[in-house]
Image: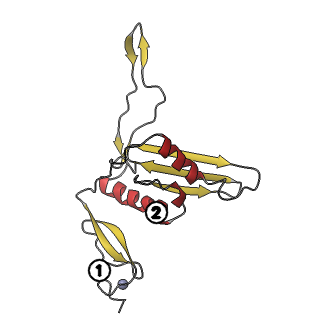
Amino acid sequence: VFINEGKDTPLCAVKEIEKSGETYWTPQQKESEVFSEDTAYIMNRMLREVVTDGTGISAQVTGLDVCGKTGTSEYGDHWFVGMIPGNVCAVWYKSDKDMDAETADAARICKGVFEKIGADASEQYSIPTGVKEEVYCKKSGLLAGEQCQETGIGYYKEGTFSKLCEECR
Ligand SMILES: [Zn+2]
């Protein structure tokens, strides 16, 4: 849903059943909207940060807009769900033994999959008309003013813009 404008499509392993050379059955995959296109895009950009500046950094592929989420458990489970436009890859990795971080890096395994499928780097997510990209102050969390030193790119729905930062001087 984070790469499909908030719409969920039921998964189906069978594409088609033929009988006597003719299509006998195809899955009825009805899309349903789980949340708005705006919310999906904002979540997508938050998940992008996991890969550019977070725990999923080893999933980065040059030229591809990879986003995703890592997960671990105290029982040796390692997950990474990675997304690029048009594709999702979920990796679950489990080990009873103590493994070094690099061997158990699910994000790196996902990177290898994205490199192998030869994804089209020209495919990009498009920003919905209801979402605005703004520079925010990392200190206050408000919209950045000229005085703010540490800033980042934030994504805001129409009508949810925060005030201008007045903390930094
Ligand atoms: Zn500030």
Q: In this view, does 160 lie to the left or right of 111?
A: left
The amino acid type of the residue labelled 1 equals Lys
In the picture, the quarter occupied by the C terminus is bottom left
> Toward which corner of the image does residue 155 lie, by quadrant?
bottom left
The amino acid type of the residue labelled 2 equals Thr
Query: What residue is at 51 percent from the left and 54 percent from the top?
Result: 59
Q: Position of residue 52 (x, y in %)?
A: 46, 63
Dot 2 crowding, Cα within 10 Å, few <14, some 14–19, many 20+: some
In the picture, the disc for residue 52 is 2
Q: Where is residue 42 in the image (x, y as percent from the top left)?
A: 36, 60
> Toward which corner of the image does residue 39 lie, by quadrant?
bottom left
Query: What residue is at 29 percent from the left and 82 percent from the top?
Result: 164
Camera-nearest label, 2 or 1: 2
How many numbered marks, from 0 up? 2
Query: What residue is at 70 percent from the left and 58 percent from the top?
Result: 100
Marks 2 and 1, the one that precedes in the sequence? 2
Q: What residue is shown with label 1? A: 163
Vertical position of residue 137 compared to residue 69: above or below: below
